Amino acid sequence: MSTRTIVLSVLSVAVLIGVGTTIVELSAPDEIRFSPAVGEQRDYRIDVSAVMREDDSQSSSSDTQAVTMQSIMRYRVDSARPSLTVHLDPRFIRAREGRQTFFSSARSGGLFRGPVRDLITGGFDLTMEPDGETRLTATNRAAWNLITKQLTGALGRQLEQHMLAPSVPLSLPAREGAQVTLDGFQGMPGLRLTVADIDEDGVFVDITRAEDGSTRVDPLRIMGHNLFIQFTNVSGRMRLERDSGWIQSLTLISDQRIDGFGTALNVHTQLAMNADDDPTTGAWADSLEWFTWTSGLAGVSDGYSLFLPQTDGEATDLPLIEPAEAPLADAGTTFRIDGKDNALALTIDHGINGDGKLGQLTLQELTLRDADGQALTIPLVLESIGIDYGDDDRQNTVIRLLPLGWADPGLERIASVDATVIYRPAEEPTHTQLSLADEPTEIRDGSVSARAVPVDGQPGHWRILFAGKDNRYYTYDRTRNYAGLSGRLIDQAVDGGLSASDRTLMQRVDEPDRWFQQYAVEGDGDTFGLALFTESTESSRHILHFTSRALRFSNRDMPPPETRYLDRSTTPGKAPLNLDDLAVRDADRNQLRLTLPRGIGSACELTASAPPLEGHELVWQPAFQRHPDFISETWTPDGETTDWLLMTDDGVRVFFYGIEVDTRLSCPGQPAWHTEPAPTPPDRPWLVDIAAAVGDDVDPETPAALFFRGTRFLDASGRPLRPMPLDASPDAPSTPWSREQMQTTLADYLADDGTIRFWGKVTAVETITFSGEPIERTWHKRLEGLQE
């Protein structure tokens, strides 16, 4: 771990534990005073992000470092008199540098071993004296003493001092406009708390840096260096429960300058604390990943490039994102245990492609069961809930959860999972345009808006500022031609000195579903295309049953673990099988190529008559057989054609010189695709009797590529499904069908009972049939010799 990571980690831990002392006292109606009952407890989700740059004026993503620390903390009131004592129990802690987790309570090893683990798992006691003095002590004092001894006494005392938050005010007038200036709140010097608003449920407090307050804190000594920390900016917002005084929501944004290690560092910190009595459930915005994604924008100095189509053709090629229809009606549901992160992963296979727009999915209830069907008690936190693209751009929803606590949760005991989800579908997007002018312009639809602001002194440059909500927002219209314009998603400070991610976290204290975003746009253009996405106000409730992904692989009587389709580059097309316009070409390039409707090359007879080359016959083969990852240059989005190449029978040579070749294509009649219902058991539509499907026994040694180009097995949507190998395993890497078909025969799929299991529910079988008189086409080509 780098020195800068250690610095950020120490600062994050200090802030994280310091949050535990931010309890403000509330006693309605005249003053805020905290007086909870003994035994009362609250759970909080605490997120801290620290982004460090060595030089803000010349910073870029390459010299930016970001550490995120997230936790679930339980606060329990143990005593009220004469002193108020609150026990802090860290139920979950995870720290990441960028996307890499370098310690997590959900998995063993790393930094959480030995006395460190003993210290954290024991928790801390926060004692508040009647005179306002506050002290924080570790429950496991022996572990604390051992750690501080190992870290040297000076560092130990300084860390202890940093975790001991100063006193909080004994009272705060409960009236709008009332102010209190204090030193040491949240470990930050010189802050002013202002009562901004009071409603029937809560008290809103603005937090700013006091103009006459201190800006420095006592130095920390790390790795033999003194770190001098100066706060250059602080702003925050807090909501307190009016009847109890407990914090309901808190955001603190701060900038610090740190001198040490022979350089000056600039650190931007975002902290969010939210009451969370059920960290297991929620939507994406309630997950750990939401904060990681939101705060992560602050760590990317130059932002992310937007793909803006520059021609009508590029815009037309991008499919419209259309709302998905009934994505949970017949979804496949499996679960697995991710051993690396010790996570429970639930997968919902919707059976829709990447162009379908899913609405919002919310996890409402979760029940884990063992092999006997008994409910298991394993506390979890929602890590993420979102889209994962499977084979052939299919959309799956993956819900990941991490265990709370420090003991082994025993996830291997889980045999099935029942989940209740709420689904709100997406509606058709509304397309509009935002003017790019010399003055600010804006479009607004209710509470969401997009505003284009010209950049001073930079003609042709604008900042587009978005204000949206989780279920209603503007974004760029990817079906629009943006010729002459380029854009990036950025996160830079704008109005009031706050970036879009800062404003999102700050505003969510008042509006939990609010978010902000910012584009940097430049170039020659006078409008910018936007699409307004909205989720329906109606919702539906679904109870989903998840079974083991591993069991779905091994048990043929169960549905397959997911849906997989044939690659489009090897899928027979839906167009008529027309043989009139076929032509052998590329003789002038000393090779021969023939583009055939898919399936014809295997259903008909395609032969070549030419002298052998060094003992090898010349044969016609699909072009991708020479290279399994080959995609035909004549491939179309509907997968209607396949390129065939003349090559030696070992696949080595495709260029020939000084020979003449006669090619013959013979078909017993006019070919056409014929569809019949699939011969499958009613209760197991993924199993197909192959002999019944094709009307005859099949040779197990038939190459898979040959068989499945002439016969395809369709699901209810009409898409051809892949066959599932007998030895399919959840641990085996996913192989593209273009490669798999060249390495297998029917014997690799055909069970002893004559059935093949498919990656999905088969409803129909399509084969090529022939009618009318036989058809024969011939071509004669000469390939010139090498030029001397």
Image: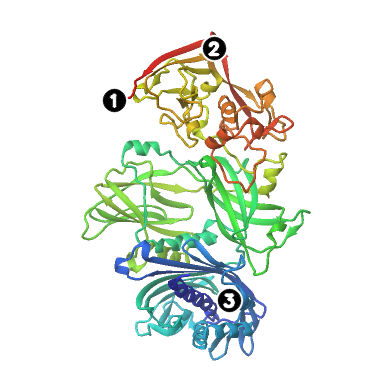
Q: Is residue 557 above or below residue 361?
A: above
Q: Is residue 512 visible?
A: no
In the drawing, does residue 280 fall left or right of residue 460? right
- Tell me the distance, in whole angstroms, between the alpha carbons under discs 3 and 2: 84 Å
Q: Quadrant of residue 482?
A: top left
For mark 3, what is the residue?
244
Q: Secondary structure at mark 2?
A: loop
Q: Secondary structure at mark 3?
A: loop
Most distant residue in the top direction: 773
For mark 2, what is the residue?
669
Q: Quadrant of residue 729?
A: top right
For mark 1, what is the residue?
788
Task: Judge by depth and name the residue closer to the eye, 473 or 702.
Answer: 702
Q: Position of residue 578 (x, y in %)?
A: 47, 17
Q: Which is closer to the viewer, label 1 or label 3?
A: 1
Amino acid type assigned to the residue bearing label 1 in the image: Glu
Q: Residue at x 47, y 59 (%)?
A: 293
Q: Residue at x 68, y 52 (%)?
A: 418
Q: Secondary structure at mark 1?
A: loop
